[in-house]
Amino acid sequence: MVQEVALALSVVDGHAAGLVSAAEALTTRLPRTLGLLDAGKVGGFGAMKVAAATAWLSDDDARAVDAVLEDRLPDRNSDQIRKAANHAAMMADRDGAARRAERNRGGRRLSVRHGETGVASIEVEDGPVEKVAAAYTRIDREARALRAGGETRTLDQLRADVALDLLLGGQGGKSERSEVFLYMDLNTYLGLNDDPAEMAGHGHIPASLAREIAGGSNTVLRRIVTDPLSGQVLDLGRDRYRPTAGLGEFVRVRDRECRRPGCHRVAQACDLDHSVPWQFGGHTADTELVDLCRRDHRLKDEPGWNYRLDSDGTLTITTPTGQRYDSSPPPLHEPRAEEPPPF
């Protein structure tokens, strides 16, 4: 079956196997996702993400996740669908998710792929997510520092050159500590529950893995105070043009990623930008600062684009054609029901 599909579509066997596996899952275990696909509310690539995220679950758990996701998938891009499906799958079988994460991390390997004359690729496959994220952040920082110093190479070229230089024992540029943002409920950290944690730019990871990362010898823990009902980070105000280090860190922790809907560039690699331009009366405060990647930062200044940041952190983007899109910073934990007053 797989080889026939591969021949019919002129694709490699591995890709064909993924298509066949997804088709089988959609027609047997994921009827609601299939319905969304038929209705045009989810694309084929997004449906494959759901099938892949639930492949390790039992049939009953897969159907339960399928029901949970029915209202969460429409109008989402494939990366948002991947994150939502992975989170729902972890919630359905937390112990299984922990075992799967341990097994996946045990399969890490280094591969080399030779290309056309003069080029080749090297890749760390299935590496520990916290180390991969930290490595990319460091490489990106070094590349941007070199670019700011007058380098004529592109950022992509600089990242590749810095990475190879570091692998070969060089410094890659100015040595600098790298960070990853790991969001974890205090009760999860203490082992009182097994709710999944979230790593900015990656998505949710099992509680056991989050505790392992948080307990690392070089880990620095910081307390972030949230509203217990909404899960949002509490306000922090400043009134200067250049953000202080504390304010900049607050906005990055709050936003996690670029605030344009559909962009998932991690906040540490984004620009802090005023939703209302400084020259037009904007203020340097958490109520007016957002994280935007360099591309979206530049787009914001193009004619016809309007950005408005509400007091609750919701960013509304209006395009030159009048289309409106909302972006809200995700809560650090699920909103909790208000407890009734004691009698």
Image (cartoon, helix red, strand yellow):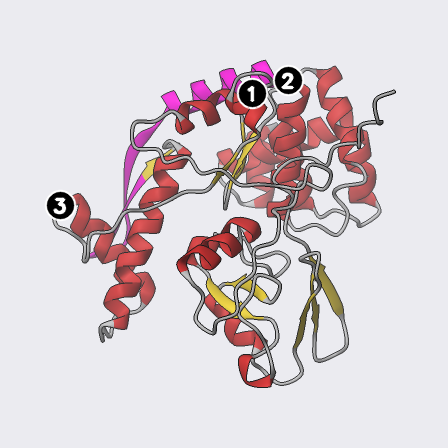
- The answer to the question of whether label 1 and label 2 lie on touching residues, with beta carbons closer than 8 A, is yes
Q: Which residue is mark 1?
A: 97
The quadrant holding residue 128 is top left
Q: Is residue 139 left or right of residue 203?
A: left
Secondary structure beneath label 3: loop
Residue 338 covered by magenta stretch: no
Q: Which residue is mark 2?
A: 93
The three-letter code of the residue at mark 2 reads Asp
- The answer to the question of whether label 1 and label 3 lie on touching residues, with beta carbons closer than 8 A, is no
Magenta-colored span = 94-123
Residue located 74% across and 43% down the image = 73
Mark 2 → mark 3, Cα distance in angstroms: 42 Å
Looking at marks 1 and 3 on the same chain, the residue that comes earlier in the sequence is marked by 1
The C terminus appears in which quarter of the rendering?
Answer: top right
In front of the other: 220 or 327: 220
The three-letter code of the residue at mark 3 reads Leu
Secondary structure beneath label 1: helix
The N terminus appears in which quarter of the rendering?
Answer: top right
